[in-house]
Image (cartoon, rainbow, N blue to C red):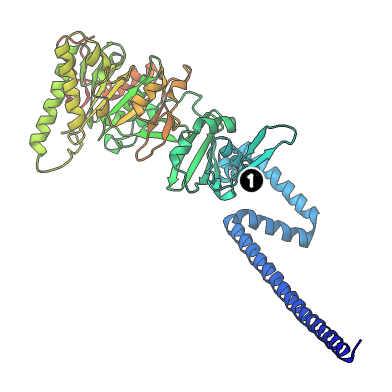
Amino acid sequence: MTASSLGTLMLVGGGLVAVVWLLHKVGRALASFLEALATLAVVLVALWLLVKALFLVIKAAVTHWRTTLGGIVLGTWLWWWGSLPVALTLAVVAVGLAVWRWRHPMSFEAWVGRRLRSWWLRWTLYARRLPSWLRACGLTVPDPHQPAVLVMSPLGRRKVHRQAKPRLDQVPRVVGVRSGASWDEVRIRLVSGQKPEDFDEKARELAVARAVARCQVRELSPNVVSIDFQRRNLLADTVWCCDLADLADVAGSDVDLSKVWSGRTDYGLDWHQSVKGSHTLVAGSTGAGKGAQMWCPLVSIAPAIRDGLVRVSGIDPKGMELAYGRRLFHRYAVTGKDALALLDDLIAVMDERKAEFAGRLRTVPINREHPLEMLEFDEIGALIRYIADRKLREAITERIALLTTQGRALGCTVRGYVQEPTKDTVPVRELFPRRICLRVASKSHVTMVLGDQAYERGAWANRIGESEPGVGYLFGEGIREPLRVRGGWVPDETIKALEAFVAGDDTAGLGTVHTFPGARRTGHHHTPNGAA
């Protein structure tokens, strides 16, 4: 080997050593930098997770403050005094609550029972199981960009297509539970892509999932709905009308005609309806309880009838239902011709009030001089559909249309009752703003009475049993969900007592009831306050 070759080899070796040394130094520096960077990343991630966890804890504590406060108190108690005092205190409280519930169940339910039940059902039932019910009913929003998982068996050609679970933000979240005496109200927040009507259409499926008889959906805000599950039927027992003895000392002017007690609701509350300013159509099969819807409001406003603030007229094609309380009615008709004369008389009253108050008032005041004219029209279809005289049918229909379109401001109210609510039977059906659907024969009748989507929203009137007369559905003021009610039952003795209450013990000097020519009549009858 020559000297030049040896020098070159030494030079190359020295260069390699220098490069290795340099790479060693760079590697150590880079390792130190990456170690520092990794340490910083771990610290930042840990800090981020800590902040996020703290935020979630604070959010949960604020959202569920009662549970959080209870846990803090219990934990502090256990820390300071141990488990024995806590166990003894809890046992004493449990015994006290049990005794309270046994001795005073109503006050216990109002103050403690419903709150404890709401808390328990939220965390043990609805928060855990409602998401699976919603998925089963198709009430989640699928992600169109969510990847699908295809599994292929190596032993065959079959392919299995599996869709991953929806993300949490695609399942409506439970925001609150309120448990009452008969209903659980589960409030949920909708996700983007959903609307309340989606839940209306799945009410039956949700009822089956919860294993209850009824479920209905109420819209609380644009993105919050309440899914109500009925645990217990509070309308299974008969609801009785008001006791006339309690109304003896009530002045007629103290009766609120816009809030007349008429029965009970499915939520265990009193049901009130207005008998002025609107018209009501009640539809139901024979034996469905139309009599309860008819007589109960009349019992509730008996002092106003007695004092001449309300004047009731009756059209009774059967000549049986209203005839039993004959003295209650200022006007009474049975046949078609008599009914037409009665309706003409009411229209004449409206014309008189038009002439008197036109340009002075927009609504006629209700007083003794201008009482509320209230028409009870039983079996309305018998006179506007089934009688043979076509001209008479058309004339009666025309009068009913005039009363229902003009009577609101002029102090005239029409309350009609029908078995078959078809448009052919009641052509003026749409002129009755308030409608009540009792037990009917078919699902289509529910739509005819209460409108489109009523059945889907929970008005299952065709499923009402024959043992539940007076039970029906209606839509409240400004409410898009059907309300289930039961009218107060009025026995025959109460109807006779109502006659005596209105007429008074001494009927001398009182005017006679109008019985139009040819109407059935059983004797000389009177109405209060000198009505002619």
> Is residue 176 shown above or below 233?
below
Report the residue at 52% width, 39% height from top. 139
Classed neighbour count for the residue bearing mark 1: other residues with Cα under 10 Å, few (<14), some (14–19), many (≥20)? few
Report the residue at 19% width, 39% height from top. 365
Quadrant of the image occupied by residue 290: top left
> Is residue 244 shown above or below 7?
above
Front residue of this view, candidates 163 and 81: 163
Mark 1, residue position: 123
Residue 342 left/right relative to 326: left
Q: Can you see residue 82?
A: yes
Report the residue at 69% width, 71% height from top. 41
Residue 46 left/right relative to 201: right
Quadrant of the image occupied by residue 481: top left
Q: Amino acid at mark 1?
A: Trp
> Is residue 521 shown above or below 464?
above
Front residue of this view, candidates 297 and 402: 402
Which quadrant holds the N terminus?
A: bottom right
List x then y, in percent, for residue 382. Answer: 26, 13
Which quadrant holds the C terminus?
A: top left
List x then y, in percent, for residue 24. Answer: 81, 81
Quadrant of the image occupied by residue 343: top left
Residue 382 left/right relative to 296: left
- Label tally: 1
Q: Secondary structure at mark 1?
A: helix
Front residue of this view, candidates 491 and 451: 451
List x then y, in percent, for residue 223. Answer: 46, 48
Report the residue at 45% width, 31% height from top. 458
Q: Can you see residue 296?
A: no
Q: Residue furthest right?
A: 1
List x then y, in percent, for residue 484. Answer: 44, 30
Q: Residue furthest front?
A: 2
